[in-house]
Image (cartoon, rainbow, N blue to C red):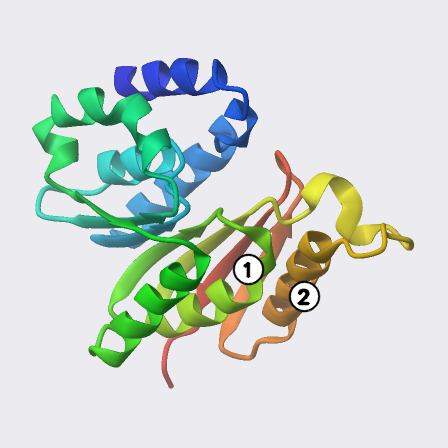
Amino acid sequence: MDPIQKIIRKRTLNLPDGGMIGAPEVIQLGQNLIHLIQAKKAIDIGTFTGSSAVAWALAMPNGSEVLTIDIYPGNYEISRDLINARPDIYSKIKRHLGPAVQKLGKCNAMLASGEAGKWDFIFIDADKINYPRYYEQSVNLLRSGGVIIIDNALWGGSVIKKTRYPGDRNTAAIDETNQKASKDSRVYNYLMNIADGIHVIFKKNNE
């Protein structure tokens, strides 16, 4: 783990909602997959304090791009000074701020502008209720052979419980996304029981 990652993690865990930071094993797996597919263009849906965006930037070569999208600008301030002091990271990260609807709008705009099939790696760890739509947009943006990681795919085990709290839309949305990925003929998928669960999606090569 790079020293900047250790500091960001320590600062984040001191926040009231610091537990939302991606688990180290999830981040490491993402970096390994980036190396494996030689990714140079990544989308990070859910910036939080920048931990995941920094990880993807570290794993990619110079000249790469990490587009990170979130609603809250304040969380990123936790790590801004560290990122700004690292040209090898700062030069790769592009930020987009906006609420959930705008995040979806950003992805739609990218599709409309010819970005479909041009991204190598996408990490989804944002508002759970929009996971199904983030998934669909991500598959369209991803190139053949590219990878999507969906974090919190088990959601504390709630997705497999026979009974749920009435109105639990987050669990329903995550479950819908898992089911969608499992039945999607465009991808290969693997739901992994590490951390809070991750769903790893590989987009099939065009035939």
User: What residue is shown at x 46% (from left), y 63% (from top)?
Assistant: 202
Q: Mark 1 Cα within 10 Å, few/some/many (few <14, many 20+)?
A: many
Q: Where is 173 relative to 39, above or below? A: below
Question: Do labels 2 and 1 touch, CB within 8 Å?
Answer: yes
Measure the C-alpha gap from mark 2 to mark 1: 8 Å
Which element carries disc 2, helix, strand or loop? helix
Residue at 51% from the left image edge and 23% from the top image edge: 18
- Can you identify the residue that label 1 sits on? 131
Residue 26 image position (x, y, % from top left): 49, 36
Residue linked to disc 2: 176
Q: Position of residue 129 (x, y in %)?
A: 60, 58
- Inspect this view and state whether residue 51 appears: yes
Q: Is residue 173 above or below residue 6?
A: below
Looking at the image, which residue is at 28% across and 15% down?
A: 3
Going by the picture, which residue comes out furthest to the bottom? 207
| Residue 72 screen position, x and y as percent | 38, 40
Q: Residue at x 72, y 60 (%)?
A: 172
Is residue 144 among what the camera can see?
no
